[in-house]
């Protein structure tokens, strides 16, 4: 007598639509999913072990996991001191090619913050500089291929720059260092912040990834080929953030470096006003200053009108103020 195969209550009795609801409860979160390095000690209340139960459950549930979650893409920096040259351009979480067609929502962190910075003087613009960072170029190239592979399936994209994990660099990792060399006859400087400025964020390092994206035809082409019209942007600092939306055509034809630079200038201006207000400067309106002693993280986009070079008064972003 042939042995009878027992039914699985979950797969054979429970209707498919109910199984999908269960998968969504177990496998989705409103928090963007970051890689191991970027998320630090943060934990996600996800139960991905269900994907390993059997092939049928994996086939049914994987589109829920990849399609309904938002994946936060960030750079992977090597441990070597000369990471600007040796970086592979890798990113986390490590999405595989076969998974990309299932992903619908991305947040991409454009920051590539090397331990040391190399710059080349730009002979075409007096007093200006260009970052020399092959690893950052490779990271932007990886982003270009990623966006290019998802141009027909991606539903939302947010560009980010989260500097908080770089704000507390150890003195051992960025002690006093200054080297000079030459590439193609152009002078290059390599510098790291002195020990007493370990907590300070380097403007040049913050802008390196934006410069590489700005000068990458592949990245700009991949961005312009996406189907949606507007792109949210968010800049996170230890004490504040900027959060706004830019029309994609404007984002592609304007300078990302200028945009990021304006955000950094606005942040510095607000911080200066906060210091002056604490010192009792009568010329500073306390309503315009974000006091450094105030608890919470403050949205600075409401404190400044950001405009891009071009048509006068061309607004690129403004959102409500939040703490």
Image (cartoon, grey):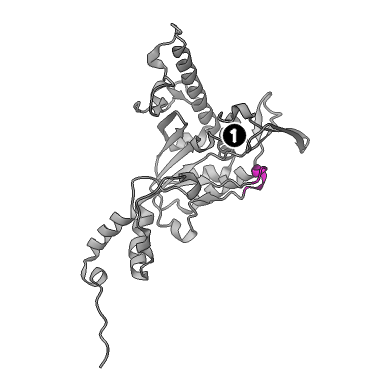
Percent across and percent down for residue 177 are 70, 33
* Residue 13 visible from this viewpoint: yes
Counting other residues with Cα less than 10 Å from the Cα at mark 1, is it few (<14), some (14-19), or many (20 or more)? Answer: many
Figure quadrant of residue 99: bottom left
- Give left or right: position of 102 versus 216: left
Front residue (pair 74, 187):
74
Instruction: Name which residue lies at 68% across and 24% down.
Output: 127
Q: Is residue 250 magenta?
A: no
Magenta residues, start to end:
80-87
Residue 70's place in the image compared with 280, above or below, is: below
> In what quadrant of the picture does the N terminus appear?
bottom left
Residue reaching furthest to the bottom: 1
The vertical placement of 17 against 269, above or below, is below
User: Magenta segment: does it hold 84?
Assistant: yes
| 187 sits left or right of 255 in the view | right
Q: Quadrant of residue 187?
A: top right
Residue at the disc numbered 1: 205
Judge whether 160 appears above or below 14 on screen: above
Which x, y percent locates residue 293? Answer: 42, 21
What percent of the width, then of the height, locates residue 134? 65, 44
Closer to the camera, 64 or 82?
82
- Asked whether 62 or 127 is in front, the reply is 62
């Amino acid at each position: 007598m042939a042995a009878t195969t027992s039914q699985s209550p979950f797969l054979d009795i429970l209707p498919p639509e109910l199984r999908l609801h269960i998968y969504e409860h177990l496998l989705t979160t409103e928090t963007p999913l970051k890689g191991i390095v970027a998320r630090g000690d943060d934990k996600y209340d996800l139960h991905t072990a269900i994907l390993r139960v059997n092939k049928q459950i994996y086939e049914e549930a994987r589109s829920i996991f990849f399609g309904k979650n938002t994946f936060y893409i960030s750079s992977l920096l090597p441990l070597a001191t000369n990471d600007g040259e040796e970086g592979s351009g890798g990113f986390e979480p490590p999405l595989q090619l076969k998974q990309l067609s299932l992903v619908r929502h991305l947040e991409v962190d454009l920051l590539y913050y090397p331990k040391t910075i190399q710059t080349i003087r730009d002979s075409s613009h007096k007093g200006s500089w260009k970052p020399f960072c092959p690893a950052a170029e490779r990271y932007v190239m990886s982003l270009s291929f990623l966006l290019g592979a998802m141009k027909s399936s991606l539903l939302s994209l947010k560009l980010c720059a989260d500097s908080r994990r770089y704000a507390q660099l150890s003195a051992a990792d960025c002690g006093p260092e200054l080297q000079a060399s030459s590439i193609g006859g152009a002078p290059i400087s390599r510098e790291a912040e002195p020990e007493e400025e370990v907590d300070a964020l380097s403007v040049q390092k913050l802008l390196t990834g934006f410069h590489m994206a700005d000068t990458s035809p592949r990245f700009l082409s991949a961005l312009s080929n996406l189907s949606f019209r507007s792109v949210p942007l968010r800049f996170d600092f230890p004490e504040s953030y900027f959060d706004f939306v830019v029309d994609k055509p404007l984002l592609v034809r304007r300078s990302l470096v200028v945009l990021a630079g304006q955000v950094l200038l606005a942040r510095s201006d607000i911080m200066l006003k906060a210091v002056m207000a604490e010192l009792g400067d009568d010329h500073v309106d306390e309503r315009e200053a974000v006091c450094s002693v105030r608890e919470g993280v403050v949205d600075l986009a409401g404190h400044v009108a950001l405009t891009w070079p071009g048509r006068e008064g061309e607004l690129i972003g403004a959102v409500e103020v939040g703490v």
